[in-house]
Amino acid sequence: MSSILGQIFRISTWGESHGGGVGVVIDGCPPLIGLSAEEIQVDLDRRRPGQSEIVTPRKESDTCEILSGVFEGKTLGSPIQVMVRNTDARPEAYEEMAVKYRPSHADFTYDAKYGIRNWQGGGRSSARETIGRVAAAVVAKKVLRAQFAPELEIVAYVKSIHDLEASVDVETVTLEQVESNIVRTGDPAMVEPMIERIKEARGEGNSLGGVVECVIRNCPPGLGEPVFDKLEAELAKAMLSLPATKGFEIGSGFAGTRMTGREHNDAFYMEGERVRTRTNLSGGIQGGISNGEPIVFRVAFKPTATIMQEQDTVSKDHEDTTLKGRGRHDACVLPRAVPMVEAMAALVLCDHALRQRAQCGN
């Protein structure tokens, strides 16, 4: 099973949804980076269940422990292990799923591939696995800001839920604006409509999908490794490795196909000593390498697979049957997906910044 991401800044996540705990091992972090469990906890609290009325009611504090790699508040350069214990697991809610496959979930495919699966809460396919990614990303952001880009900003937000679309200015949206509302959108006018739409779906035992948009500001030019590890390709892989993702686009994305080259090209100009572009339809990446403009991309999340309505399915013995969802689930993953998207962006950027320094010395 593939559980490792990165070449120099490498993370390996571990654990299952209803096992003893989940976490991450981080290799390749430079020494002397200030780090505490309290700093990691801030982002874990943004990701954790039970944080508001529109997310899963599972009550987990997601309190992290740093088990290695940090001494007297600084990284040692050795592997860093972060663990979060599971304290509110209820595997009995999933007993029916031991013999019945949840539609559009990973149950059937895990059995088809491995011949065995942990059916308690989805095991390794659960979004609980992302705790390790979010924890590791706190370290990645500290490395980036300490050694490469002091003014770096990574801000993700809910762009759309179902057919409700927010209007957000990628140049000015802030983390504080996003965190000021439980749906985590950057458009105040869409907060209540989105909340009500999620509540409506939950009341019906149904679920909703949507899009998370992310902007990375003050990223230095030169990051990315053509031809196979282009920066947008690495970001796409990272985002599509998140649970429930179904699409990725950067810059103009698919809309760019309806433009001409004259309309789409980003004209260059000089701003002092800095090369700039007058438009940013490239989304901050050209030729697979960052150009110093804001990196803007979007990630599509499908409706949560587990719903509280009866559906047709098959059993492990390949017999037709029905299944109604049990357990505690998000009716919409979008609010909790925001810190996950930011985390994956930080992990990719940190790895590529260290790779750039190793190859080119800057």
Image (spheres, helix red, strand yellow):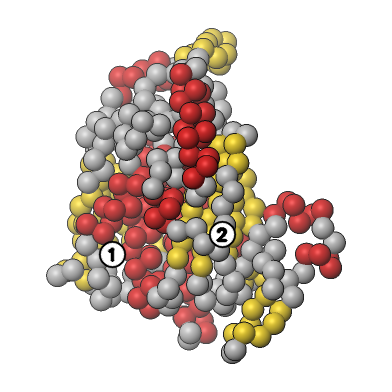
Residue 12 picture location, percent across and down: 38, 55
The single residue placed furthest to the left in the displayed view is 72
The residue drawn where x is 70% and y is 57% is 252
- Judged left or right of residue 165, residue 136 is left
Q: Is residue 3 above or below residue 317?
A: below
- Judged left or right of residue 168, residue 125 is left
Q: CA distance from mark 2 to mark 1?
A: 36 Å
The single residue placed furthest to the bottom in the displayed view is 273
Q: Is residue 225 visible?
A: no
Residue 16 picture location, percent across and down: 34, 38
Mark 2 neighbour class, 10 Å CA radius: few under 14, some 14 to 19, many 20 or more: some
> CB under 8 Å between callouts 2 and 1?
no
The residue drawn where x is 52% and y is 62% is 172
Please state which of residues 47 and 173 is positioned toward the viewer in this rendering.
Answer: 173
What secondary structure is found at the residue carrying circle 2? Answer: loop
Residue 279 placement: quadrant: bottom right
What secondary structure is found at the residue carrying circle 1? Answer: loop
Q: Is residue 314 above or below residue 151?
A: above
The residue drawn where x is 39% and y is 55% is 176
The single residue placed furthest to the front in the displayed view is 189
User: Please, what is the three-letter code of the amino acid marked with disc 1?
Assistant: Pro
For label 2, the residue is: 170
**What label sits on residue 79 in the rendered view?**
1
Between circles 2 and 1, the one closer to the viewer is 2
